[in-house]
């Protein structure tokens, strides 16, 4: 058998070492895979006329996520033309495949300018400081998430008189994690729940039975907010005259305006959920496949 000179062996070893260094530095061997939320519980449709269904609900996915997993983010876009909503939604979903798991998120964020859904308190408008809509540090036991962006007119005080808050999201704007509502109590972000025998209580976590009694009037419920801090109560149904409760403007980054609106005094909001992790090699976020959470109408006097 012919043997290679020692110099040749050293040369080949160096080439292999350089190649390995190149691939490592390029991050080709360390691709971050983020698993997507996959389980829908309630997925509304903008054309539906049953207001009890005008909320989104799904189950997060905390299984086999990378160490840098940040949590689950919600993205949204406002439209006044339903055909625009359908066209852009279908375009996003057309590339939502495992062959390129980030393509849908990239198209959603970069091409169509979908924005991150925020949160603020209902009474005072205090912004909720959070890294993502559902932070990874509270993901437990396949957490169920439900949110409604606008209260149906006439239900502004639903829950004040002992109504069944298990279906709170069917009536009032809210954010709910595994049956408990997000809220501010005494200036702190907590979870609140109602028991017919014990009344309202607040909790530090989404699970556990130990809670502290609280009066309904001392609860400031947390509701979804637009990325510019404004609310989804576009027509100021409660006559607050607040600058937060205004219709979208053509210049708003979260709004796709069409001179030919589908209906007067009507808007549509489309939602997607996506898993997010931080990619240290690119110093940017890595995304999962997106989950279509559906779309809701926002109609004056409804």
Image (cartoon, helix red, strand yellow):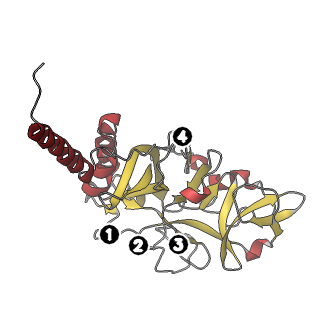
Camera-side residue of 7 and 65: 7
Q: Name the residue under label 3.
A: 129
| Quarter of the image where one finds residue 227 | bottom left
Residue farthest along the right direction in this orientation: 197
The answer to whether residue 152 is left or right of residue 7 is right
Counting residues from the N terminus, which is met first, the one under dot 3 or under dot 4?
4
Counting residues from the N terminus, which is met first, the one under dot 4 or under dot 2?
4
What whole-number distance in Å separates the C-alpha atoms at marks 4 and 2? 27 Å
What whole-number distance in Å separates the C-alpha atoms at marks 4 and 1? 29 Å
- The answer to the question of whether label 1 and label 2 lie on touching residues, with beta carbons closer than 8 A, is yes
* Numbered disc in front, either 3 or 2: 3
Camera sees residue 155: no
Rendered residue at 48%/52% (across/down): 67
Q: Residue 262: x percent and y percent? A: 34, 52
Rendered residue at 37%/68% (across/down): 248
**In the rendered image, the vertical position of residue 224 relative to residue 93, given as above or below:** below
Q: Residue 25: x percent and y percent? A: 25, 53
Q: Mark 2 points at which residue?
A: 228
Q: Mark 1 points at which residue?
A: 252
């Amino acid at each position: 058998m012919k043997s290679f000179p020692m110099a040749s062996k050293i040369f080949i070893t160096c080439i292999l070492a350089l190649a390995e260094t190149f691939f490592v530095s390029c991050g080709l061997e360390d691709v971050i895979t983020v698993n997507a939320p996959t389980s829908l519980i309630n997925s509304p449709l903008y054309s539906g006329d049953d207001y009890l269904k005008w909320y989104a609900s799904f189950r997060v996915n905390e299984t086999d996520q990378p160490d840098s997993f940040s949590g689950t983010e919600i993205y949204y876009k406002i439209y006044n033309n339903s055909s625009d909503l359908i066209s852009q939604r279908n375009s996003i979903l057309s590339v939502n495949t495992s062959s390129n798991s980030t393509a849908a998120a990239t198209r959603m964020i970069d091409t169509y300018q979908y924005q991150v859904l925020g949160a603020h308190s209902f009474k005072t408008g205090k912004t909720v400081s959070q890294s993502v809509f559902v932070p990874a540090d509270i993901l437990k036991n396949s957490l169920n998430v439900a949110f409604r962006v606008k209260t149906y007119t006439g239900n502004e005080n639903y829950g004040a008189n002992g109504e069944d808050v298990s279906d709170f999201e069917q009536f009032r704007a809210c954010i709910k994690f595994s049956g408990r509502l997000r809220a501010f109590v005494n200036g702190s972000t907590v979870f609140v729940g109602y028991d017919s025998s014990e009344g309202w209580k607040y909790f530090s976590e989404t699970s556990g039975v130990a809670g502290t009694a609280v009066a309904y009037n001392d609860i400031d419920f947390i509701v979804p907010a637009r990325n510019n801090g404004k609310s989804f109560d576009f027509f100021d149904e409660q006559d607050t005259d607040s600058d937060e409760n205004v219709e979208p403007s053509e210049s708003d980054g979260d709004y796709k305006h069409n001179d030919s609106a589908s209906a007067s005094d009507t808007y549509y909001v489309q939602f997607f959920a996506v898993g997010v992790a931080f990619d240290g090699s690119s110093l940017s976020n890595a995304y999962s496949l997106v989950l279509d959470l559906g779309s809701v109408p926002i109609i004056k006097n409804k």
